[in-house]
Amino acid sequence: MSSIRPWRDIQRRKSRQIMVGSVPVGGDAPITVQTMTNTLTSDAVATIDQIRRCEEAGADLIRVSCPDEASTAAFRQIARAARVPLIADIHFHYKRALEAADAGAACLRINPGNIGSGERVAEVVRAAKANGCAIRIGVNAGSLEKDLLEKYGEPCPEALVESALDHIKLLQDHDFHEYKVAVKASDVFLAVAAYSALADAVDCPLHLGITEAGGLIGGTVKSAIGIGNLLWAGIGDTIRVSLSAEPEEEVRVGFEILKGLGLRTRGVRIVSCPSCARQGFDVIRTVEALEARLSHIKTPMSLSVLGCVVNGPGEARETDIGITGGGNGKHMVYLSGVTDHHVQSEAMLDHVVALVEAKAAEIEAAQAEPVAG
């Protein structure tokens, strides 16, 4: 059946589906959003607290660093407390992989070629199979193998892809196929080119990211360009936005990228104007307040916040709830795209929050109703 708006369609690359704990990755599963804790993993209480905040922000998967034995010892308690599957990043020490697999990791982040002998790779694969763990191969432009740097002269798409294929072969040689792959770089052009080439070469799920992207604003922009470019092309099954910011911010940005492309919806999508001298209320401060006060809403819905009647009515027609600035502190409220009533400036913020909460409850109630047989 042809699409009503074909210019919005994204044809996702066909990939194999794997399971990361209870979460499907690849195939026709929703694109998952991942982040990584930055607490000391050996401090289980602090790590669990941070995981809880990431879960509340919507994280589907959370990666936890396991660089030492104290971390993997605490990992068992952390994994029991987590509500989403955890990925153990074991760096270069294969014994940490064995310990993390036994302690409840749903996935191990390793590069098989970097953990030593073939027997060590075999041990890790045996542990992964015995515990139902997936494996994430993580190739990074900043840590390419010396022989590939000598061969290509610098990190380049061909080098990243060759590294990924070498690591994949090590797993396939042990009849292990529950893996996903990343070929990350801090250079957007390099990352996009490498992922595009790898997407043509393999059928496994791909984990997208622009590594070391930067701070909240700069890193968000770089990640949106790189990850968004690939997702728009249909490439990518799980994403992590790598920011020098708290991990829950990475989750929020990840969902905003997916929402912007219509690939996933979670919470309130706010359509708002940049504000100008025509505005009937302070749009900037209003949107800031609404984002904070509506962050608890998980039900997908849309809200338009426009300062005047130039574009306000048109945008409101496309959203669940809309507010358009008027004169003398009197503003028009739209419900389901239709003009409904006015609200005064002093009551507007509380009123909009109440409308959104009521609409979310209405949507949730409708979804909970049993389908008539």
Image (tube, helix red, strand yellow):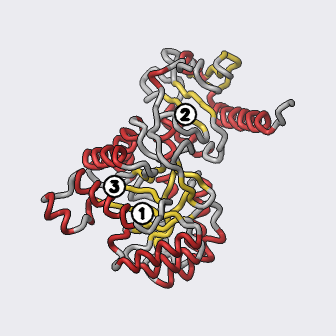
The residue shown at (25%, 45%) is 189
Local packing at callout 1 (Cα closer than 10 Å; few below 14, some 14-19, many 20+) is few
Image-based side of 92 in relation to 252, left or right: left
- Check disc 1 and report the residue beneath it: 172
Question: For the residues marked 2 and 3, what is the alpha-carbon distance in whole angstroms?
Answer: 33 Å
Of the numbered discs 3 and 1, the one sitting upstream in the chain is: 1
> Which one is in front in this view, the residue at disc 3 or the one at disc 1?
1
The residue closer to the viewer here, 133 or 104, is: 133
> Which one is in front in this view, the residue at disc 2 or the one at disc 3?
3
Give amino acid for label 3. Answer: Val
The residue closer to the viewer here, 249 or 140, is: 140
The residue closer to the viewer here, 96 or 283, is: 96
Q: Is residue 142 above or below residue 305?
A: below
- Check disc 2 and report the residue beneath it: 270
- Mark 3 residue element: strand
The residue shown at (36%, 54%) is 215
The residue shown at (58%, 21%) is 318
Please tell me in which quadrant of the rendered image residue 322 appears.
top right
Give amino acid for label 1. Answer: Gln
Q: Is residue 352 above or below residue 128?
A: above
Residue 234 placement (x, y as % from top left): 43, 37
**Number of marks drawn:** 3
- Mark 2 residue element: strand
Question: For the residues marked 1 and 2, what is the alpha-carbon distance in whole angstroms?
Answer: 45 Å
